């Protein structure tokens, strides 16, 4: 796909969404595994299936419903993505981050992401939460590869501060007020869908990673390139390969994501009340 085709698709998708809503939110929240129940606690105004949005990919992963909501969360009007798209589903990083470009084109200035991650730092236990302060995306095909989308950002964007400091402080403050443990750490991206090997986890630990997962990084890159403020929180759903000695499974991921759901929802509600 050429740059002009991709940008035209972004325009078409954004205009479709614009035609379905009466007001454009300033924030987009992406719900990772286990956070779906949050939508039961919001005031939903509009619900748009991904399949209705021109050029949107389809979600194929359990726990990712595939709907875009416009809702009020703690009184704040927000887009809510019920499910995201992954490289391991067969999408390119440009396709997986297509929604980010659409949100940027709509004028959304803040992207809040959640995800499920494997814990590398053993100070964190399964079902606890980690605020992402930085990432290691060395294995991530850049969503910026190819002709630059000058309409969004520069050819060589700085990555010194991908995750917004002010938003991070609000999230830390929210956790402290609620008494919810919130670790801070570096998230490493791997392509998946296979889990990492023990040797890969040992290598990532040497590089400074605290948690590992298969999403978020490409989206953060595309969002920061688009001038958006980014915040991301991981639910530590399991110890990464080789740490506990137990085999990894998606059922364990979902089980611990569901265990943390109450804290995750409370934290998001408190955080949004500060926006």
Image (tube, rainbow, N blue to C red):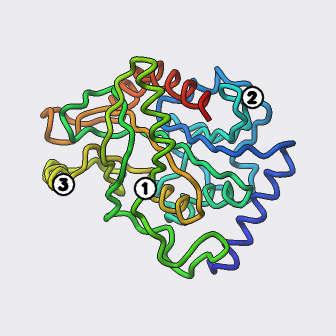
- Residue identifier under label 3: 200
Q: Position of residue 206 (x, y in %)?
A: 14, 54
Task: Check disc 3 and report its element: helix, strand or loop.
Answer: helix
Depth check, front residue: 226 or 6: 226
Depth check, front residue: 173 or 228: 173
Of badges 1 and 3, the one in the foreground is 1
Depth check, front residue: 250 or 268: 268
The span from disc 3 to disc 2 (Cα, nearest Å) is: 42 Å
Task: Check disc 2 and report its element: helix, strand or loop.
Answer: strand
- Residue identifier under label 2: 44
As drawn, is 216 to the left or to the right of 102? left
Relative to 8, does residue 91 appear above or below in the rendering? above
- Residue identifier under label 1: 217
Earlier sequence position, callout 2 versus callout 1:
2
The span from disc 2 to disc 1 (Cα, nearest Å) is: 28 Å
Relative to 81, does residue 192 appear above or below in the rendering? below
Task: Check disc 1 and report its element: helix, strand or loop.
Answer: helix
Q: Position of residue 252 (x, y in %)?
A: 33, 29
> Residue at the location (63% across, 55% down)?
99
Q: Quadrant of residue 14?
A: bottom right
């Amino acid at each position: 796909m050429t740059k002009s085709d991709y940008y035209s698709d972004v325009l078409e998708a954004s205009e479709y969404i614009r035609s379905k809503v009466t007001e454009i939110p300033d924030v987009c929240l992406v719900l990772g595994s286990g956070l779906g129940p949050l939508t039961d606690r919001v005031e939903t105004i509009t619900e748009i299936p991904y399949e209705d949005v021109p050029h949107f990919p389809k979600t194929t992963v359990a726990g990712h419903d595939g709907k875009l909501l416009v809702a009020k969360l703690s009184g704040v009007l927000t887009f809510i993505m019920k499910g995201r798209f992954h490289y391991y589903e067969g999408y390119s990083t440009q396709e997986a981050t297509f929604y980010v470009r659409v949100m940027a084109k709509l004028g959304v200035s803040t992207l809040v992401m959640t995800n499920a991650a494997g814990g590398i730092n053993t100070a964190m236990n399964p079902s606890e939460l980690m605020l992402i302060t930085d990432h290691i995306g060395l294995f991530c095909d850049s969503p910026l590869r190819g002709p630059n989308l000058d309409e969004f950002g520069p050819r060589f964007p700085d990555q010194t501060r991908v995750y917004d400091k002010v938003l991070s402080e609000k999230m830390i403050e929210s956790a402290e007020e609620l008494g919810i443990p919130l670790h801070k750490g570096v998230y490493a991206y791997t392509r998946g869908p296979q889990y990492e090997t023990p040797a890969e986890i040992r290598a990532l630990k040497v590089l400074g990673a605290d948690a590992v997962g298969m999403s978020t990084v490409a989206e953060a890159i595309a969002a920061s390139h688009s001038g958006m403020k980014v915040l991301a929180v991981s639910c530590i759903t399991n110890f990464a390969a080789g740490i506990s000695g137990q085999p990894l499974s998606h059922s364990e991921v979902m089980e611990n994501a569901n265990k943390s759901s109450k804290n995750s929802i409370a934290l998001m509600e408190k955080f949004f009340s500060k926006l």
